[in-house]
Each structure stands twice: as structure tokens, then as C-alpha cells.
Amino acid sequence: GCRVPTNPEIAREMFPQQQYPAGAYGQSRALVGPAKVAFLRKVYGLFTTSIVAAAVGAVFALHAGSGASEVTIDLGNGAFMAASAVRHKPGVNLVALHGAAFISGVYIAPAIFAATLMAATGHTLSPAPVRDAFVLAVGGFSGLSAYALVSRKDFSFLGGFVTMGFFVVFAGLILGMFVQSSAFHLAVASAGVLLFGAWVLYDTSKNLREGD
């Protein structure tokens, strides 16, 4: 009985003919990588379809009037709690996910209407702020997620930055209620964009490297 070395690299050098299972000495990147990437693609695919459902909900509310949004305030929390409760039930979880996303779209419809109204009266920097925000958010999220998935770089060093940045942006949002300054609001919004861009890289990289 020879002692089996515990270091995976030494073991492979000493016994190159030996076939090691995926679970031996930890899972290899070559074996785990494709499965993780496929899983994350599925997750981001569901995220994309949820955004579409939310957009449909927002359009529905804009045409239905304020009554739809008032009803949604009462249903919103219940919808997300229900979606969380059935998340392990195949088929039902997808319906619950997209239903909750639809309701969230109805909920934010008044904010979309207000932004569109302000743009029509010339009170925004962009003539179409809702469209521009949507395009920038989707483009930024898709680009950063694709970069993290393709490069598979380790962005775990961003963990401290995104945690601290969240509280800074949150404090800026509260302070913005009392500071009537377009420049300040633009600075907070810009910091939020950078923060959540870093968060996408960090979270995608973390999910690629964590075990199931």
C-alpha cells in the first residue's frame, strides 16, 4: 500500500495513465466549465424573458390607466413570495417567475409615465430617457455577462468594492431627496451604473467558480 499523494498535480505527474473522476482532487475547470456556462446561460435566458414580461406589464398598465398600478401595489409582494415558494416545482416556477415580472412591470409603469411626460416637456437630458435607459441597461448587462462567461476571469476581488459601493449609492439616493441638483443626481446615477456593472462581473465570475 503506497500512499496516494494529495496534491492533484503531483498525482497526475506520478500516475499519468490514471483516469481521475471529476470529483477527485476537486472538479477540474475543463469538466465543470461547460456545465456552469450552460447553467448560467439558462439563468440569463430566463432573466431576459422576465424583462420582456415586465415590459409587457408596463405597456399594459400604461394603456389601462392608474387603476392597474394601484391593484399591483397590493399584489406585488404576494406575487414575489409565491414565486419564491414554488421555485422548485418545474413548469409552475416559470409561470410564477414571469407572472411576478409582469406585475413588477405594472408597478413601475407610473415612473415610466412620469419620465416620458418630463421628456415631452423638455425637463430631461434625453428626449427619450426610458428608451435610452433600457438600451443602455440591456447592452451593458449583456456585454459584461458575455465578457465574464467567455474570458472566465476571476473577478472575486470586486466583492469589497461592490458591497461598499452599494451603501454609498444608497446613501446618495437618500441624500438626493433633499438635494435638488441635476449634477448630483447625474453623479449618483453614474456611480450606480458603474457599481452594478462591477456587480455583474463579480456575480457571474462567482457563479462560475462556486460548486452546485
Image (spheres, rainbow, N blue to C red):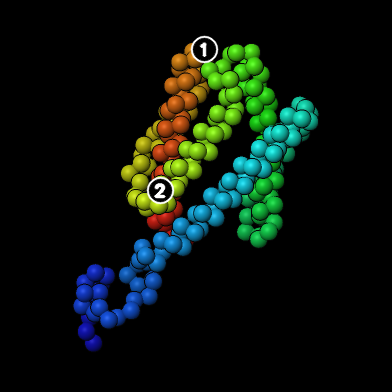
The percent coordinates of residue 168 (x first, y second) are 42, 28
| Residue in the foreground of this view, choosing between 90 and 144 | 144
Which residue is tagged 2?
Answer: 148
What is the spatial separation of the Cα atoms under label 2 and label 1, in whole angstroms? 38 Å
Specify few, some or many for label 2: CA neighbours under 10 Å numbering under 14, 14-19, or 20 or more. many
Q: Comparing marks 2 and 1, which lies closer to the viewer?
A: 2
The percent coordinates of residue 111 (x first, y second) are 64, 26
Residue 77 appearing in the image: no
Give the total number of marks visible in the rendering.
2
**Is residue 66 depicted above or below 94 in this figure?**
above
Which residue is tagged 1?
Answer: 180
Q: Which quarter of the rendering shows the N terminus?
A: bottom left
- Residue at x 35%, y 72% (from the top left corner): 24
| Residue in the foreground of this view, choosing between 178 and 156 | 156
Picture quadrant of residue 66: top right
- Type of residue at label 2? Ala
Specify few, some or many for label 1: CA neighbours under 10 Å numbering under 14, 14-19, or 20 or more. few
- Residue at x 59%, y 29% (from the top left corner): 131
User: Which disc, if any, is residue 89?
Assistant: none
Residue 75 appearing in the image: yes
The percent coordinates of residue 106 (x first, y second) are 70, 34
Q: Could you tell whether 86 is left or right of 206 in the image?
A: right
